């Protein structure tokens, strides 16, 4: 019996030594993690904390304190690493890191870190979209902005930028829908300005193709969102080509009202005067001819016309 007792005692002593070694190793790994973190080596610190956690959990109750400390540190550290990736514009890496962070934080009961990670995801997509938009990768930018809107349909800025990306691809209907979504969520002024510009471009294309009624229609659409001098100028030219003199005069007058110092102001006023003269409205014809009597190009002709009226 004595021999057996000695064997049991030796085994117990050996187990005690092994346990002391294991707890010391877990503690050392945790302390190494803390030192690396102080030095700003976050990736290395995370590896040490994860190793310490694995060791501590293997020790059961005896390693509980170390395990709990690791679980309290790891999620926040993972989130910090993700934020560093965002700053470095490593968006794909940041998204992957945030997904891991949310998973680990959920497992360890760090609800604040879970919410922080979820909040950061659409911000990453937004930053990614902005960079792609600036790089003229319009398809990639549109995909990134759509990710933001999938998470938060009320994000007016994401909708505005989505409209810009879609419009740059010639997707007018889709761009309009995005801009209207932006307008409904705090970006009305900017969205309407962009919509006005889209339809001015459509009017320009129609005018070049000599589709004059389409030119007028697109110009009208532009002005629905925001009065645009160029839209009135295009509509006036199209109306004149169609022989719609009254409409032409109206469009030109609105053009001059919005852009009184336009380079072609003299030519436009001369045209308005001539059209009024053709329609028999002598008083309005005189008014516009009088405006350009000093014009170096049209002044002499205006003075001659005034003599006849």
Image: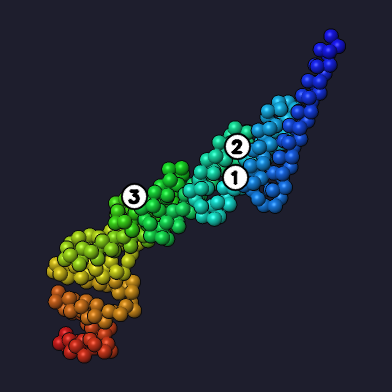
The residue that mark 2 highlights is 105
Crowding at dot 2, Cα within 10 Å, few <14 / some 14-19 / many 20+, comes out as: many
Mark 1, residue position: 79
Tell me which residue sits at (73%, 36%) in the image. Answer: 25
Asked if residue 165 lies left or right of residue 54, the reply is left
User: In this orientation, does residue 38 appear?
Assistant: yes
Report x, y in % for residue 217: 22, 60
Answer above or below: position of 19 versus 158.
above
Mark 3 and mark 1: Cα distance apart in space: 35 Å
Q: Which residue is mark 3?
A: 177
Residue 108 figure quarter: top right
Q: Work out how far the residue at label 2 is from the one at label 1, CA to CA, in angstroms.
A: 9 Å
Seen in the picture, residue 283 relative to 206 is either above or below; the reply is: below
Q: Quadrant of the N terminus?
A: top right
Q: Earlier in the sequence, mark 2 or mark 3?
A: 2
For mark 2, give the secondary structure.
helix
């Amino acid at each position: 019996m004595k021999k057996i007792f000695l064997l049991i005692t030796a085994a117990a002593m050996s187990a005690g030594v092994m346990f002391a070694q294991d707890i010391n190793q877990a503690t050392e790994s945790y302390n190494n993690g803390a030192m690396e973190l102080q030095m700003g080596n976050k990736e290395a610190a995370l590896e040490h904390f994860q190793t310490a956690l694995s060791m501590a959990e293997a020790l059961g109750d005896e390693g509980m304190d170390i395990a709990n400390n690791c679980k309290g540190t790891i999620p926040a550290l993972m989130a910090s690493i993700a934020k560093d990736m965002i700053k470095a514009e490593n968006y794909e890496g940041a998204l992957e890191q945030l997904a891991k962070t949310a998973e680990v934080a959920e497992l360890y009961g760090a609800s604040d870190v879970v919410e922080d990670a979820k909040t950061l995801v659409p911000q990453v997509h937004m930053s990614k979209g902005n960079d792609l938009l600036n790089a003229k990768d319009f398809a990639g930018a549109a995909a990134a902005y759509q990710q933001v809107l999938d998470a938060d349909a009320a994000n007016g800025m994401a909708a505005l930028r989505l409209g810009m990306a879609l419009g740059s691809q010639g997707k007018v209907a889709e761009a309009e829908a995005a801009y209207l979504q932006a307008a409904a969520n705090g970006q009305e002024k900017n969205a309407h300005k962009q919509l006005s510009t889209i339809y001015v471009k459509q009017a320009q294309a129609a005018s070049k193709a000599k589709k004059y009624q389409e030119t007028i229609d697109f110009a009208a659409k532009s002005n629905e969102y925001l009065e645009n001098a160029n839209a009135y100028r295009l509509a006036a030219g199209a109306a004149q080509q169609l022989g719609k003199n009254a409409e032409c005069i109206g469009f030109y007058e609105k053009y001059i009202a919005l852009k009184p110092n336009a380079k072609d102001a003299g030519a436009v006023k001369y045209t308005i005067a001539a059209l009024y003269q053709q329609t028999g409205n002598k008083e309005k014809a005189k008014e516009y001819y009088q405006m350009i009597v000093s014009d170096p190009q049209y002044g002499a002709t205006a003075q001659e016309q005034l003599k006849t009226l």
